[in-house]
Image: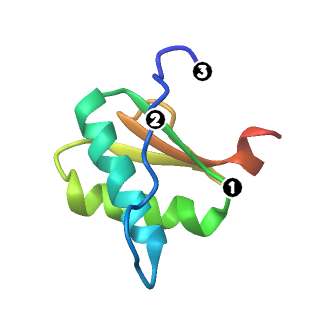
Amino acid sequence: PPGFPAVPHDLARGPSCDPAPRRTVTAIEDAKRVGGPLLYVAHRKNLVHQTGREFARLWPDIDHGRIEGGRWEPERHVVCASVQVLSL
């Protein structure tokens, strides 16, 4: 959407028993460099929730929200959504 920059992010580097959190942290670090506003799109609902929790933990001074069933918060500085919800 207009106003939301594309944020390229690297995949986790090196071995890890659970790479998803590392990728999420890398994406949040990239988002902090870009500044925002930012739309974070994940391919699964649980990743939207995980990312929302990580944004709250790693970048607590920003206002973040979600677009999902029953929640519509596009005015927030960082918005997390799933591909499925955006394709409706």
- The location of residue 59, given as percent across then percent down, is 21, 51
**Alpha carbon separation for disc pair 2 and 1:** 27 Å
Q: In terms of secondary structure, where does tag 3 sit?
A: loop
Residue drawn 24% across and 33% down? 33
Quadrant position of residue 54: bottom left
- The location of residue 52, given as percent across then percent down, is 42, 58
Front residue of this view, candidates 45 and 13: 13
In this rendering, position of residue 32 left or right of residue 10: left
The residue lying furthest to the right in this view is 88
Identify residue for label 3.
Answer: 1
- The location of residue 62, given as percent across then percent down, is 24, 42
Q: Which mark is residue 69?
A: 1
Counting labels gives 3
| Three-letter residue code for mark 1 | Gly
- The location of residue 13, given as percent across then percent down, is 38, 62
Identify residue for label 2.
Answer: 8
In this rendering, position of residue 67 left or right of residue 85: left
| Three-letter residue code for mark 3 | Pro
In this rendering, position of residue 52 left or right of residue 47: left
Residue drawn 65% across and 54% down? 70
The residue lying furthest to the front in this view is 14
The residue lying furthest to the bottom in this view is 17
Q: Nearer the viewer, mark 3 or mark 1?
A: 3
Quadrant position of residue 55: bottom left
Q: How is the image coloured?
A: rainbow
| Three-letter residue code for mark 2 | Pro
Nearer-N-terminus badge (2/1): 2
**Alpha carbon separation for disc pair 3 and 1:** 19 Å
Whether tag 2 and tag 1 are in contact, CB under 8 A, the answer is no
